[in-house]
Amino acid sequence: MKKSISFLLLAVSLALPAAAQQDPKAGKILDQMSAKYQALKAFQATFSQTLENPSAKVKQNLNGDIVVSGQKFRLKISGQEVINDGKTTWTYLKNENEVNISDSDPDSQDMSPSQIYTMYKKGYKYTYVQQVTEGGEPLDVIELAPENRQNDVFKVRLKVRKKDASVKSWQMFKKNGNQYTFLIKNFKPNPPVDAGTFAFDKAKYKGVKVVDLR
């Protein structure tokens, strides 16, 4: 059975109707940030993901790696690997040695992480909060709130570096008390990629069970 991946939850939460009015200062920063990433042919990043729920006394830390090129991506996190070539999605579960295959649909809830830098344009009202300094680095803090009140995410907080409009981190706050924090650690622009980067090669996974959900 296909398992969800927390990194994709941000993409899910932002797939909503467009907002009518926005904070122009926040919009300018977000547009600069979006243009920066869309100008790249590809990028690779390692990241940490922290799940916290203070009332439930839960705190979990995971590390992951992602490669993105346009609508294609390859994501590795917590024994799972998700590969998308823009048409097909392969979700490999290491413990089960199983891969689930499904059609890629950019309008579905399993939206591509490659859209994370443009999703603010649909369904969220964004507001400039403040400038902060972390580790001697000035950051702009922007908050996004969903227009759809039925969304289980009520707030997303982005931290964008002032020096180059790159994303340092973002937090996602859910109504059930869960808080997800994603911190970009190492970022590599335009790494070498080819068709094999975004395809599942069955030969490299000995004895893998294939579940075709298409």
Image (cartoon, helix red, strand yellow):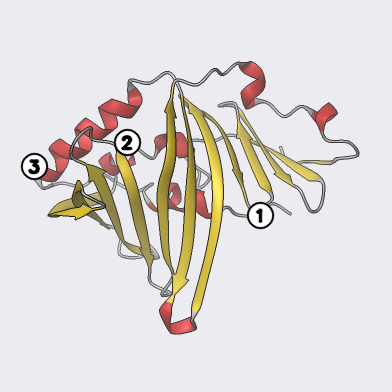
Local secondary structure at mark 1: loop
Single out the residue that lies furthest toward the left. Answer: 24
For marks 3 and 1, the one nearer the N-term is 1
What amino acid is labelled 1 in the image? Lys
Q: Residues within 10 Å of mark 2 (few under 14, many from 20)?
A: some
Classify residue 98 as left or right of residue 54.
right
Local secondary structure at mark 3: helix
Q: Residues within 10 Å of mark 3 (few under 14, many from 20)?
A: few
In the image shown, does 71 or 77 lie closer to the viewer? Answer: 77
Which residue occupies 62% across, 26% down?
A: 198
For marks 1 and 2, the one nearer the N-term is 1
Q: CA distance from mark 3 to mark 1?
A: 38 Å
What amino acid is labelled 3 in the image? Pro
Q: Quadrant of residue 40?
A: top left
Q: Give how far across and how far down residue 13 sits, in percent.
A: 40, 53
Local secondary structure at mark 2: loop
Q: Give how far across and how far down residue 118 sits, in percent.
A: 32, 36
Q: CA distance from mark 3 to mark 2?
A: 16 Å
Classify residue 208 as left or right of residue 14.
right
Q: Residues within 10 Å of mark 1 (few under 14, many from 20)?
A: few
Which residue occupies 36% across, 49% down?
A: 14
Which residue occupies 41% across, 75% down?
A: 177
User: Which numbered circle lies on residue 118?
Assistant: 2
In the image shown, does 8 or 77 lie closer to the viewer? Answer: 77
For marks 3 and 2, the one nearer the N-term is 3
The quarter of the rendered structure image containing the C terminus is top right
Which residue position holds label 1? 3
Which residue occupies 20% across, 31% down?
A: 32
Which residue position holds label 3? 24
